[in-house]
Amino acid sequence: MDSQFPILKVFCKVLLIGKSGVGKTSILLQSTENFFPSEHKPTIAVDCRIRNSMHDSRVVRLMIFDPPGKESLATLTPAYWYSVDAIIFVVDDRVQSLRYVKDKVNAIFGSKDEELLKKVLKIILVNKKDLITGEEGKNYKNEIKNYANEYDMKYYKCSASDPAALNEIFKYIIDTLFSNPSKEKAKQAKEKLKTQKRKNICSRCSLF
């Protein structure tokens, strides 16, 4: 590319939702810092990190938000939902983690934001896949797959310690968001770029 033409930067917002302990923070750190923490520390405040990728000569900056798993949906500021491009619902080997996601989805789709969030790219990610074994584990995975189909979610399973698996997930997000983008989507991307410039968001991220 000719150096006189700047590379377009596009910002996309990804939200991680899941019960405390499912590994959201590990996914966040592995995806953005190439670091897998050796011990679990509960998230006590909203964390956000940047993952940079290239797509069709554009720098795509994924702003990945990790709110505390114990925080109720009602306390999440509307800014999260109104500007989100993709949501990754994270579950693990515990049945309670799927129940948590179901509760969150029910809250979302029973709210005034239902129509808005129907358009959002949704993924259900099974973390700690190696712990889901046997006939009971097989039935549990089938339940998750059926649930994903019901709500038009892409199904993935991985271990947060495996960067290749996470790379595949984020590649899917970027490819899907930018495949045959509508005029509305292009406008949203342009508006996000303007917003980022105006507010001068730091690398640790602020809500916009």
Image (spheres, helix red, strand yellow):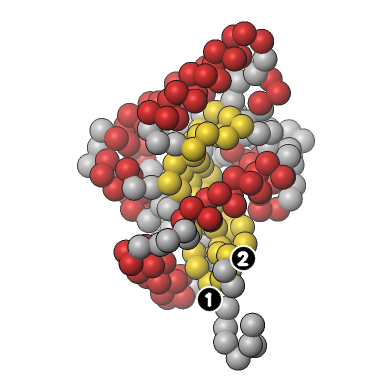
Find out whether the residues at labels 1 and 2 contact each other: C-beta distance under 8 Å: no
Q: Using the image, tell me which numbered label, if any, was put on residue 54.
A: 2
Amino acid type assigned to the residue bearing label 2 in the image? Met
Q: Residues within 10 Å of mark 1 (few under 14, many from 20)?
A: few
Give the secondary structure at mark 1: loop
- Mark 1 or mark 2: name the one nearer the start of the chain: 1
Task: Identify residue for label 1.
Answer: 8
Residue 173 at x, y = what percent? 52, 50
Give the secondary structure at mark 2: strand
Q: Is residue 166 left or right of residue 184?
A: right
Residue 71 at x, y = what percent? 44, 35
Where is 153 relative to 195, above or below? above
Residue 5 at x, y = what percent? 57, 87
4 or 97, which is in the foreground?
4
Q: Residues within 10 Å of mark 2 (few under 14, many from 20)?
A: some
**Residue farthest to the left, as pictured:** 112
- Res. 56 in view: yes
Report which quarter residue 115 is drawn in.
Answer: top left
Amino acid type assigned to the residue bearing label 1 in the image? Leu
**Residue farthest to the front, as pictured:** 180
Report which quarter residue 149 is drawn in.
Answer: top left
Tell me which residue sits at (59%, 45%) in the image.
169
199 or 13, which is in the foreground?
13
Residue 143 at x, y = what percent? 48, 18
**Residue farthest to the right, as pictured:** 38
82 or 182, which is in the foreground?
182
Q: Is residue 182 left or right of residue 176?
A: left
Where is 105 relative to 88, above or below? above
Tell me which residue sits at (49%, 72%) in the image.
200
Tell me which residue sits at (44%, 71%) in the image.
193
Q: CA distance from mark 1 to mark 2?
A: 10 Å
